[in-house]
Image: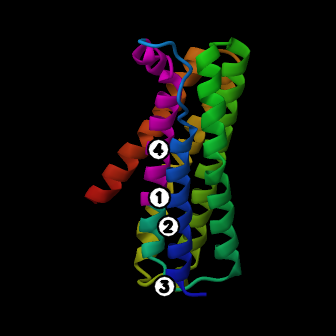
Amino acid sequence: MKTQRIQAFSDGIFAILITILVLEFKLPNYANGSLCQAVFKQWPIFAAYLMTYAYIGILWLFHHDIFGFVKKTNAKLNILNLFSIFLTTLLSYSMVLLSESMATFNRNDMMFSIALYSLLAFGISMSYLIIYSFLSKNSDFLAKTDDAVSIKKMRIYPLVSSLIYLMTFILAMISVSASGVFLIAGLSFHVYAYWKNAMN
């Protein structure tokens, strides 16, 4: 299979996933003259949407860059890519759970939704780490053998983010506020990692 087909398929999934996120926005129930207040009460879905949209967008940028190095593929790399995308598609459901728990402000529900979101993010980071490791050890898959050195250095990004999300998952069992801070820190780290990588 040509790498162009993998990129086209993956890009299509990312595009669809980002698009369907907005479908979670529903017209709120409101009395005449109180539409503004009703919309403002939907802030949890707006917050979860912005966070998830940015996260998926950054994942797509990293995915696009990493497969820009690849000149050929095989069954193992294809399966690794499919698994990574599978985990990414679950972010839509996780976003809904997070926004619903934020709306009710129930502590147990928020602990569960943050734990699930962070566990999913941990899995996604690990999937990228595995892909990076595979490519760094199989330079014949790369357009330039020297690219293996660059990819090997890039492994630090998913490694750090996976540790942040693992800590978020643990904290979700203890403190909602602390785990929320770590979750945002993990997402912010992706932005920093991509910016730093783009500058190199």
Q: Residue at left 51%, top 74%? A: 7
Q: How dense is the environment of label 2, judged by Cα within 10 Å: few (below 14), some, or many (20 and up)?
A: some
In this picture, which residue range is highlighted in magenta?
34-61
Under circle 2, the secondary element is: helix
Tag in front: 2 or 1: 2
- Please give the residue where the numbered disc 2 appears in the rendered image: 11
Q: Residue at left 49%, top 36%? A: 49
For the residues labelled 2 and 1, the Cα–Cα distance comes to: 7 Å
For the residues labelled 1 and 3, the Cα–Cα distance comes to: 19 Å
For the residues labelled 1 and 4, the Cα–Cα distance comes to: 11 Å
> In front: 134, or 89?
89
Residue 106 in the image: state x and y as whole percent.
Answer: 68, 12
- Please give the residue where the numbered disc 3 appears in the rendered image: 71
- Please give the residue where the numbered disc 4 appears in the rendered image: 53
Dot 1 or dot 4: first in sequence order is 4
For the residues labelled 2 and 4, the Cα–Cα distance comes to: 15 Å
Tag in front: 1 or 3: 1
Dot 2 or dot 1: first in sequence order is 2
- Please give the residue where the numbered disc 1 appears in the rendered image: 60
> In front: 18, or 133?
18
> In front: 18, or 112?
18
- Compared across the picture, whether 121 is left or right of 151 comes to right
Dot 2 or dot 4: first in sequence order is 2
Q: How dense is the environment of label 1, judged by Cα within 10 Å: few (below 14), some, or many (20 and up)?
A: some
CB of mark 3 within 8 Å of CB of mark 4? no
* Looking at the image, residue 91 lies above or below residue 140: above
